[in-house]
Amino acid sequence: MIAATAVFAGVMTGLGVSPASAADPVIDNKALLANPSAPDGSKITKAEIKDARNIRLHVYSAAMDKTFPVDVQRPADASVPRPVLYLLNGAGGGEDSASWDAKTGALKFLSDKNVNVVQPIGGKWSYYTDWIADDPTLGRNKWTTFFTEELPPLIDGALGTNGVNAIAGLSTSGTTVLALPIAKPGLYKAAAAYSGCAQTSDPIGSEFVRLTVEVWGGGNTENMWGPVGSEEWVRNDPYVNAEGLRGLELYLSSGNGLPGQYDTLNGEYALPGAYGLANQVLIGGVIEAGTNFCTRNMQAKLNQLGIPATFNFHGNGTHSWGYWQDDLRQSWPVLARGLGL
């Protein structure tokens, strides 16, 4: 406990902002339950209590030789070990304003649930995967390693979880949350993918990846998985490797790309102004139509394999936050089953 307490030294930021959870030993004692390290030397270097429910961990990744913030909302009742929901942001990695925290009431919705909500911050434009080479623009990315080998033992040890995990993500992370359970069988019990594209190695899927990483992110997909169509592209394709999803509780969703209820001028979940709305309707509409195509393909693939999954094709809707907030709420029963809640 002495070592764990030292991690907190000098970084308390105040209590009382969010409703307190019942008898949380971490919050109450202002100390992590342990000071664990991953097999490769990854570790928590600092922990900040943000309020009565929320902690920011600073996690050193040995694979990337870099420290990343990881935000945690503690369970409603943390008096006994609880499961973990890893909630991933989209292409910006939570480093920009397009995040679950900034754009939705996700944490408020989850605040009465007995689950640790873990949100890593970092990895923009990386597809949260292991890159085969460092990139001049996007740096070193070893996110599969981070999510499957480095972070889970730190979260479990420091916060005293029960070792049961689920994962959910949107947009590019809608690909990631299907790829990670395949990469590490047994780590996750449930996965929810909102407006993602499971296929990455075919011409359409690889073009989605290239558009995100190269056109928007400025990176080079050859540093990510090598030449398009090569072994790494196929190995990281959840559609091709969908058999690895057998046994998980699965939820996949998408709109059709046509304007829907949240695509209104200066609406709560719309980009501001006429230009912002046009961007959301035109560009966001095209992207969502693409993810709808991908998600229907994945539905056919899982049906062919006899792997049960919940699909929600919610009709009109663009690639935007109002629909993803609804998706999180609607997917919760599926995630909760996997988490044992």
Image (cartoon, grey):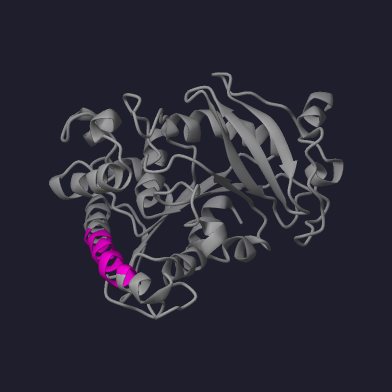
When the figure is inspected, residue 310 is found, relative to residue 115, above or below; the finding is below
State yes or no: residue 36 in magenta: no
Residue 71 on image: x %, y %: 62, 46
Residue 314 on image: x %, y %: 35, 73
Q: Number of numbered discs present?
A: 0
The image quadrant where one finds the C terminus is bottom right
State yes or no: residue 281 in magenta: yes
* Residue at x-position 23% and y-position 30%: 222
Most common SS among magenta residues: helix
Of 144 and 312, nearer the camera is 144
Tell me: 89 left or right of 84. left
Q: Is residue 121 visible?
A: yes
When the figure is inspected, residue 14 is found, relative to residue 163, above or below; the finding is below
* Residue at x-position 47% and y-position 57%: 98
* Residue at x-position 49% and y-position 43%: 188
Residue 290 on image: x %, y %: 23, 60
Of 24 and 16, nearer the camera is 16
Tell me: 29 left or right of 218. right
Tell me: 311 left or right of 49. left
The image quadrant where one finds the N terminus is top right
**Magenta highlight range:** 279-293
Residue 92 on image: x %, y %: 43, 49
Of 196 and 79, nearer the camera is 196
